[in-house]
Amino acid sequence: MTGNMAKGITSSGLGVTNFVARYNLNNGLENSDYAYIVISNGDIVSNVEISINGHIFNESMEIGKPSMILLNDVMPKSEYKDGVSVDFRYFDINNNELKNDEEY
């Protein structure tokens, strides 16, 4: 994966990192594919809601050990023509939303 763009680095106090990465660059950047990656240290995040251009994906993460979510090929390339809008929301084991700016 080259030509990657980071969408957020480490979420403050949550032990989670998220990225948007481009891959399959053989036919140029405008024809590349997107992958959405979330890596957790396993401390408190048990569920992640990923909104990609308004489409919502809910994924679980393991508590107690590092884990990763990889979403790719989730939308047709035609939906990316005007760009990508991505938002990540994190939840604990009781489904309470965790805020990035809170201390844990």
Image: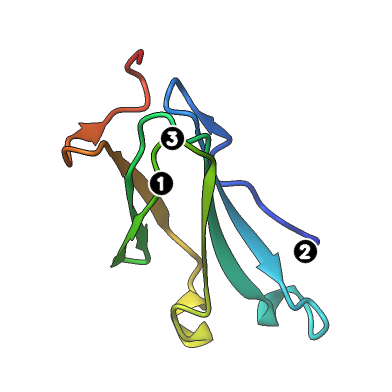
- Viewer-side residue, 43 vs 11: 43
Q: Position of residue 15 (x, y in %)?
A: 49, 29
Residue annotated with mark 1: 62
- Viewer-side residue, 14 vs 22: 14
Residue annotated with mark 2: 1
Secondary structure of residue under mark 3: loop
Instruction: Categorize mark 1 by other alpha carbons within 10 Å: few (<14), some (14-19), many (20+).
Output: some
Dividing the picture into quadrants, the one containing residue 4 is bottom right
Whether residue 23 sits left or right of residue 33 in the image: it is right
Instruction: Categorize mark 3 by other alpha carbons within 10 Å: few (<14), some (14-19), many (20+).
Output: few
Instruction: Point out the tag, 1 or 2, that comes first from the N-terminus.
Output: 2
Cβ atoms at labels 1 and 3 below 8 Å apart: yes
Residue appearing at x 54%, y 41% in the figure: 66
Q: Quadrant of the N terminus?
A: bottom right
Secondary structure of residue under mark 1: loop
Residue annotated with mark 3: 64
Q: Position of residue 71 (x, y in %)?
A: 50, 67
Residue appearing at x 48%, y 72% in the figure: 82
- Viewer-side residue, 61 vs 64: 64
Secondary structure of residue under mark 2: loop
Give the residue at the far top of this rendering. Answer: 103
Of the residues tagged 1 and 2, which is closer to the observer? 1
Instruction: Point out the tag, 2 or 3, that comes first from the N-terminus.
Output: 2
